[in-house]
Image: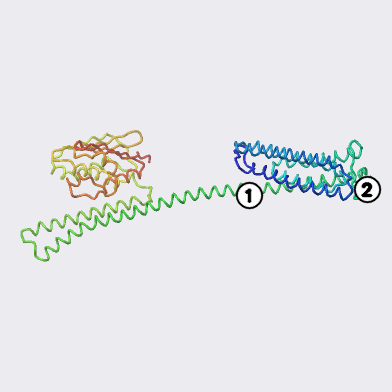
Amino acid sequence: MSTLAEIAIGGPASGRVRWLSGLRWLALTLVALIILAGNRVMGTVLPELAILGVLAGILAYNGVFWWLTRRLTRRGVAIRTLTALLRAQIYADLFALTVLLHFSGGIENPFSIYYLLIIAMGSILLTRRDSHALPIVASLLWTGLLLLEAQGLVPHYNLRGFRLPTRYQEWSHIGAEILVLSSAAFFISYLSSSLIQRLRENERQLQETNLACELRADELADLNARLQELDRSRIMFIRLVTHELRAPVAAIQSYLRLILEGYVPPERLEEIVAKAEQRANDQLDLISDLLDLVHLREPERDDSFQPCDLASVLEDVLDLMQARIADKRLQTQVDVQPDLPPARARAEHAKQIWINLVSNAIKYTPEGGEVRITLGRQGEMLCGAVQDTGIGIAPEDQERIFEQFFRTERAKNMSRQGTGLGLSIVRGLVERYGGQIQLSSAPDQGSTFTFTLPVSTG
């Protein structure tokens, strides 16, 4: 049965109450017809007025239960209340059946079997505790009726021509009737309650399985949506890569065709070849960045790598960039906190982070500008920062600056070289080791990229 906290508005419990009331209307009609017809056949040996009075009483309380059920279910009521209403109907039926049996022959009436029908319905519709109580109550009512009639405390109505008139006073027959009905009542109660418990347990398991299936369906729907999004991203990535690879190849092809077809004068031959070489270098840079992206998506297979010294890696990168710094006459300031512990990162990955950040600062800072690099420790993280006085990044572009292939319009106007993959690679490398990268920038006021990497504990 549902939990008692459930609000039953047209729910299972209210349906059971209405079903029982409707069944009682049908049973009441059949019993009335059978008893009255049998009484006429036997020569009116039973008190018809008393029987009709009992039937009227059943009709009255059934109408009350019907009205209460409709009213309560319209208002919304806890199942505890409807269960109590259902229980009251079952016990009222047991008492009404006892009174009806008394006026229609008592021990001689074969309709005492209806006790078992009421017990079976009660065991199915009510709780397990009620299934134990119902056969006890039925046995006590039937036993009390037979003893009262046998002792003459209440009159006995003999079914003349159907049973012997003294049978209701035969103690062996009384004992047999009580034993048979009581044992059958307890057996029916046990059987009905056991079956309904199994059915309810199966229903509960089915509901849990259905809920698990619904959750799994939701998970599958989410996974499907993610797969579709990944597929869209894959298609977009392929389109972008194809476009970026195609442009340099087309340019190189054009330069070579001009040379082969003799359209390039000897004095410009070196210039055209240099442009073709630059395009080839651009393509190699793009391919290198794409390989780095692929490696980022691969799981880390070897955790035995040696932690790296970020300061030493930075020093090597600055040596590589020194010629570009000198060409643009940039002022550089490097502030590295002494005695820093090693970082939990591969040296080649740390080098990629520094190269991308420092080369971007150099590329987008006008001649005579300044680049400032700092490295220090903050708790269990090493914090590096690259600050420039370059063109800066507009607020609307900052949200996309770490996307693959994204370059701002000002960056494209200032330098045609660039794949738009450097910052996405930096973010992937930093987050791979549990760090973070942040941007602080404003147009024409420069940019500051700050990243963190965990301190090595090995």
Q: Give SS at disc 1.
A: helix
Please tell me which residue is depicted at 17% across the width and 47% down the height of the picture. Answer: 415
Residue 441 screen position, x and y as percent: 24, 37
Residue 365 screen position, x and y as percent: 17, 41
Using residue 102 as the reference point, say whether residue 125 is left or right of it. Answer: left
Color scheme of the displayed model: rainbow
Write down the residue under mark 2: 164
Q: Nearer the viewer, mark 2 or mark 1?
A: 2
The part of the image, by quadrant, that contains residue 12 is top right
Using residue 173 as the reference point, say whether residue 358 is left or right of it. Answer: left
Mark 2: give few (<14), some (14-19) or many (20+) Cα within 10 Å.
few
* 8 or 254, nearer to the observer: 8
Q: What is the C-alpha distance between the residues marked 2 and 1?
A: 50 Å
Using residue 411 as the reference point, say whether residue 85 is left or right of it. Answer: right
Q: Kindly identify the amino acid type of the residue bearing the numbered disc 1.
A: Asn
The part of the image, by quadrant, that contains residue 327 is top left
Residue 153 screen position, x and y as percent: 90, 35
Using the image, tell me which numbered label, if any, was put on residue 202. Answer: 1
Looking at the image, tell me whether mark 2 or mark 1 is earlier in sequence order. Answer: 2
* 303 or 379, nearer to the observer: 379
Pick the quarter of the image with the N terminus: top right
Vertical order, 456 against 278 (above or below): above
* 191 or 117, nearer to the observer: 117
Using the image, tell me which numbered label, if any, was put on residue 9. Answer: none
Q: Kindly identify the amino acid type of the residue bearing the numbered disc 2.
A: Leu
Pick the quarter of the image with the C terminus: top left
Mark 1: give few (<14), some (14-19) or many (20+) Cα within 10 Å.
few
Q: Do the residues bearing badges 2 and 1 touch, measured as CB atoms within 8 Å? A: no
Residue farthest to the right, as pictured: 166
Q: Give SS at disc 2.
A: loop
Counting every numbered tag in the picture gives 2
* 405 or 131, nearer to the observer: 131
